[in-house]
Amino acid sequence: MAVALAVGVGLTAACSGTPAVDAEGSLVRDSAGIEIVESTSPEWSAPRSVEVEPVLRIGREEEGPYQFAVVGRALFLQDGGIAIAEGRAQEVRIFGAEGSHEQTLGRRGEGPGEFTGLSWVLEHSDDSIAAYDWSLRRTTVFHRPSGGSRNVVHQLEGNYAVFGRTRDGPFLLYSPGGGYRPDLPPGLQWVFSDIVAVDPADGSSRVIGQLPQREQLVEPDGNTGRVIPGRYAIQAVAEDGFYWATPDRYEIDFFDVDGVKRRVIRRPVEPPPVRQDEIDAYIEAELERVRRFEGEDAIPRYRRSLEEASYGESAPLFAVAFVDRDQRLWVSGPAWPDFQGPPSSWSVFSESGVWLGDVATPPGLLLFDSRGDEVLGVWRDDFGVPYVQVHRIR
């Protein structure tokens, strides 16, 4: 189902207009004040890859700040260090450029400076770190030199998640939604979410638009069913706005902090069809996971459920995205048909929306951030122990 990404009454990006820039492999047009960047070939002369061996590894099996169980987020800091959100301990851990532990911020609890659902961390300023708690619906800002903190309670009704903050601007939130939608007509459709800008000073908020967030099969009674492979919007925040796209087409929209569409990034790539052999392989992989955790007796029930599930006709084009320290947009390849590991390839776009090229990643490495010729990600060993690692791009 094709959906045009829009905010408010809907700004459409038509392909009319006179080309403003005609670079090698890219064409830039202007249509009603919206810049349209179409790339047919990459700017880099050859694809690039991430080296298998890390130049820095943070993690140990013994207890302490170097032991990780759930790494929800990691990012490079302005001073060269690394911030890591540890989900099991509900802590934000700061490490120096050489990997030494420098500071732990927060802990489990519901009091000031504490978390029960730590899900996001970002650099609030040169000396502050902000961390979002989806359960308590608040952002905590830590002053690193003093270790002090203040809570920004989000004045919102419903389930919302932070997906970033613009430079000196608001936190940006969207709603992952729920599974019961009696307000929607039956059928397969994209469910929209409010995009909310929250003031980091007092928590006041304003809705800056509505965008399609996920595709769901709405039943006549209002319950929603999962479609496999799932198609969810990607989002990423830059210094002066945010990116949003649904994976049914290779069209990524860029909006400013007021929710006004400013740029459209396009590539002539069509979604691949979902083949029966891929569905069969997916079912067997899911059943193997059931067998490992629940035993053989659970297989018939799960097999029937998986075989009767709703499967889409086309696979998603991408799965996740982020904006790195250099304001480049990284868009991963699809997770289908292999849902067992992180994406193995990423497309990188310049700040102006030009497709620079593709980067291949080692098996099992999930990227979170990048700067220069380095990437930051999490990798798990054969026992499932996570390590935060820095790799070079070759």
Image: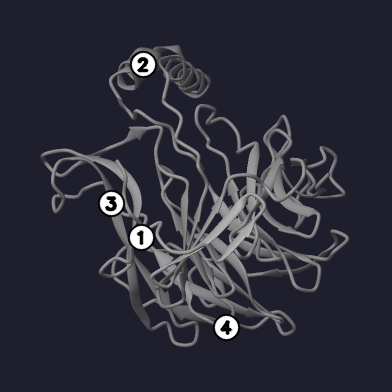
Left or right: where 247 falls relative to 221:
right
- Where is residue 178 drawn, in percent x and y? 29, 51
N-term mark: 3 or 4: 4
Task: Give how far apart the Cα atoms at labels 3 and 2 are.
Answer: 28 Å
Q: Nearer the viewer, residue 370 or 293?
A: 370
Label pair 1/2, CB-CB below 8 angstroms? no
- Residue at the far bottom in the pictured view: 201
- Tag 4 or tag 2, which sits nearer the N-term? 4
- Three-letter code for the amino acid on which mark 4 is drawn: Asp
Which residue does the numbered mark 3 point to in the structure image? 191
Q: Pick whichever of labels 1 and 2 is earlier in the sequence.
A: 1
Residue at the disc numbered 2: 303
Q: Secondary structure at mark 2?
A: helix
Q: Which mark lies nearer to you, 3 or 1?
A: 3
For the residue labelled by badge 3, is the local secondary structure a helix, a strand or a loop? strand
How far apart in space, not on screen, are marks 3 and 4 (Cα)? 30 Å
Left or right of 128? Residue 293 is: left
382, 309: nearer the viewer = 309
Q: Residues within 10 Å of mark 3 (few under 14, many from 20)?
A: some
CB contact under 8 Å: marks 4 and 1: no
- Expressed as whole percent of the image width and height from the top left, the position of residue 327 reads 65, 66
Disc 2 residue crowd, few under 14, some 14–19, many 20+, Cα 10 Å? some
